[in-house]
Each structure stands twice: as C-alpha cells, then as structure tokens.
Image (spheres, helix red, strand yellow):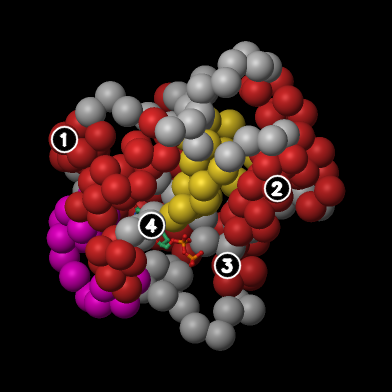
Amino acid sequence: MSTHARFITLEGMDGAGKSTHLAWLENHLRQRGLEVLVTREPGGTLLGEKLRELLLNEPMHPETEALMMFAARREHLHQVIWPALAKGTWVISDRFTDASFAYQGGGRGLDEERLRQLERWVQGDFQPDLTLLFDVPVEVSRARLANNATLDRFEQEKNDFFSRVRDAYLRRARAFPERIRVVDSSLPLEDIQGELATLLALWLER
Ligand code: TYD
C-alpha cells in the first residue's frame, strides 16, 4: 500500500446518511493504523465555523453564498487540510468543493464556469484523492429529514432544489469516474458497509 497521506471527501444530499458512514470510515482507517483527521465544510476552522453559522441560517444572495463557501474553504485548506496532509495525517472531510457545484451550481443555478474560477483560485489543481458520493432518491432524503426537529436554510428547500442537487452530483460523478465513487445509500446499512469495505480495500492497494 502506498503510504502518502490521502484526502477523502464524503458527499451526498442532506439525509443521505453521511454521518453514519463517516464514523465507519474513520474507524476503518484507524484500524489500519493510519493517523486520521476528520473535518467538515462549511467549517473546520474557527472562522469557518462562524461562516457556517451564517451560511446555514442567514438569508443571502446565491453568489454571496458561493463566495462564502469558498472563503471558508480557503481558510480550511491553509489552516487544516494541507498542514495535516504534509505531516502524514489522512484527512476525511464531510463535504468539499463538489458540494459547491451541486448546491450552488445545481441547486441555486449559478454558472459553473464562475465556480470553476473560484475553485482554481482557492485550491489550484488540488483535488480529493477519493470522493464517496452517498446517493439516495430525493424522496428518501426528504423522509429522513422529516425526523429532524429543526431544518437549516438548505434543508428547508423544496424537492425540485434537491433534484437539481442530486443531478449535479451524479453529473460530476460521471465526469470524474476515477475520483468519485457513487454508493447507493438506500440499501441496508450492512450492505453499504460491505460495499465500502470492498471499494476501500481495492483503492488502498493502488
Ligand atoms: P451538512 O454537512 O450536510 O450539515 P448537517 O449534516 O449538519 O446538516 O452541510 C451543511 C449544508 O451546507 C448542506 O445542506 C450543504 C451545504 N453546502 C453547500 O451548499 N455548499 C458547499 O460548498 C458545502 C460545503 C455545503
């Protein structure tokens, strides 16, 4: 197995079960003796968490939203992700730039080229080594969210917003098949974990 520290991101719609899979993945990598750091976007730094609070709760123009997502990301890369990878720590991030293409691009309808410019500015050529996209039909994601006591600004969006988010994620998975692996998140948990274990075993040996 090659030993350089890798950057893994988890993506999917709200209610796709990411948090459960994240805990499983963290544990799985630690059991292999790897040093692992778990972080999230928007957030991951002191400033990023303040921006997250605003992003999830304050009404704002869609372009302001995109700029703030990338501003938080710039801070996150400089303060957390790049230093960790440099010292050999593996990094798992609960969401990263694919979420901006899915939510701000697909969901809000922002021009993709604009997002690509921000991506280049903020991260250059840097990309995750692996992205796990937890995919569920919109109805499943909505049904799971119905159990939440409070819903943030994104979770309050309508079904057509989530359909556009899902389509945008799946389009990206087709565009970057080497990096983005789609996991059917409507399957029973044991099946998903079995699939993840197989997928990771193959990927880690590369
Ligand atoms: P999420 O991690 O799903 O929060 P939680 O599970 O605690 O509800 O992410 C918060 C929201 O931020 C989610 O609805 C997607 C959105 N988001 C974007 O719109 N663009 C982005 O670039 C990122 C990173 C997240």
Question: Label 4 to label 3, Cα distance in Å?
Answer: 26 Å
> Is residue 117 covered in magenta?
no
Question: Label 3 to label 2, Cα distance in Å?
Answer: 28 Å
Q: Secondary structure at mark 3?
A: helix
Residue 113 point in image, percent of width and height: 19, 34
Mark 1 or mark 3, earlier in chain: 1
Q: Is residue 7 left or right of residue 142?
A: left
* Image quarter for ligand 1: bottom left
Which dot, 1 or 2, sits closer to the camera?
2
Which residue was labeled with disc 1?
Answer: 121
Name the disc covering residue 142, or none: 3
Q: Which quadrant does the N terminus fall into?
A: top right
Mark 1 or mark 2, earlier in chain: 2
Between residues 54 and 151, which one lies in front from this camera angle?
A: 54
Question: Label 1 to label 2, Cα distance in Å?
Answer: 33 Å
Which residue was labeled with disc 4?
Answer: 44
Question: Label 1 to label 4, Cα distance in Å?
Answer: 19 Å
Q: Amino acid at mark 3?
A: Arg
Residue in the picture at 79% in, 52% down: 189
Which dot, 3 or 2, sits closer to the camera?
2
Q: Secondary structure at mark 1?
A: helix
Q: Is residue 109 left or right of residue 168?
A: left
Q: Amino acid at mark 4?
A: Gly
